[in-house]
DNA sequence: TTCCCTACTTACCAGATGGTAACCTCAAAG
DNA sequence: CTTTGAGGTTACCATCTGGTAAGTAGGGAA
């Protein structure tokens, strides 16, 4: 008895700008990575320290996805041990207000909770 | 050979307001649900229509979580077939700027993509 | 009395996610 | 020529997520 099955969870048709944006910042760690990059370019291992708890695998995965989407720029610096610098593209910089709004609300939520308890 | 294992993915210590907020709006469908609720109170089946593609199970799950967190208010209307009205609490209303910022950025991202292609 | 409606709840299961650990490349140092 | 360090990649595996489908409650309609 075959059942229809979907290859991907396709939340909402792409008519919705909310889903549009969430498709980019939706992954775990992603907002954190963008947030830390928004302060300026960072190297791989610096990012790994910034984003506490992320594994190298996830960091690579996320950075690759973000690069493919044109959100971050990847540049190999020909030093010895070669290092890699990641930075936000100007497209990526457009995400900053959204991240900042989330940070801001998170902040207010925290204050509120502390006040109540 | 036992390996240590974690009961939960505990992304970042709660010092970070970003993670604080993402813990609330992080689940799939959640931003959409909050967005649709931000326009005013809605019944269960209305929400299920608004948020295209969500299953009853997920909608219940998300609404319960949001209720437990004090983000949405649940009120049973004693009509016949009893209906249930969901609305944002004033705590929940604080999330609106974040959602709106995401929608806004999503909008700009879309325009940019359309312009480039 | 049996059906239907709203609003769930539960069992079951496929597929996506993410962690650990081992491995790879390249260049310079020893 | 082996080691070291940056920046990965891969295999393996457990957990988490979310969908389908079926069931529940309680009152009104037929």
Image (cartoon, coloured by chain):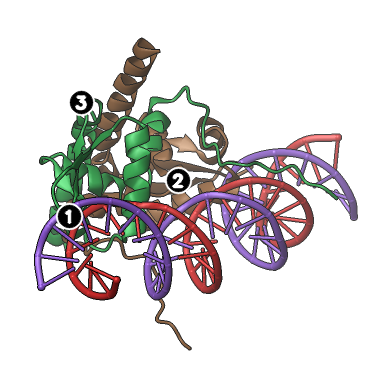
Chain colours: A green, B brown, C purple, D red
Identify the mark at residue A81; answer none if there is no mark.
1
Which quadrant of the structure image shows residue A100?
Answer: top left
- Towards the viewer: A104 or B7: B7
Q: Callout 3: 10 Å neighbours few (<14), some, many (20+)?
A: few
> Mark 3 highlights which residue?
A90
Q: Distance between the residues labelled 3 and 1?
A: 29 Å
Q: Name the residue rendered at 15%, 39% in the picture.
A: A38
Q: Name the residue rendered at 19%, 30% in the picture.
A: A93
Image quarter (top left, top right, bottom left or bottom right) of the C terminus of chain A: bottom left
Q: Name the residue rendered at 38%, 49% in the picture.
A: A61
Viewer-side label of 3, 2: 3
Q: Callout 2: 10 Å neighbours few (<14), some, many (20+)?
A: some
At numbered mark 1, what does the secondary structure look like: helix, strand or loop? loop
Identify the mark at residue A73; answer none if there is no mark.
none
- Give how far across and how far down residue A45 sits, in percent: 19, 56
> Mark 2 highlights which residue?
B28
Identify the residue at the far bottom of this view.
B1
Which quadrant of the structure image shows residue A31?
Answer: top left
Which quadrant of the structure image shows residue B23?
Answer: bottom left
Q: Is residue A111 in sight in this rendering? A: yes
Q: Which chain carries label 2?
A: B
């Amino acid at each position: 008895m075959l059942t229809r099955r979907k290859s991907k969870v396709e939340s909402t048709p792409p008519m919705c700008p909310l889903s549009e944006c969430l498709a980019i910042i939706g992954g775990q760690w992603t907002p954190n990575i963008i947030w830390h990059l928004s302060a300026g370019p960072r190297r791989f291992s610096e990012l790994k320290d910034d984003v506490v708890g992320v594994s190298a695998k996830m960091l690579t995965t996320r950075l690759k996805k973000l690069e493919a989407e044109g959100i971050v720029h990847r540049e190999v610096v020909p030093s010895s041990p070669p290092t890699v610098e990641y930075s936000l593209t100007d497209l990526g910089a457009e995400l900053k207000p959204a991240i900042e709004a989330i940070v801001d609300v998170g902040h207010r939520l925290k204050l509120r909770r502390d006040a109540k308890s």
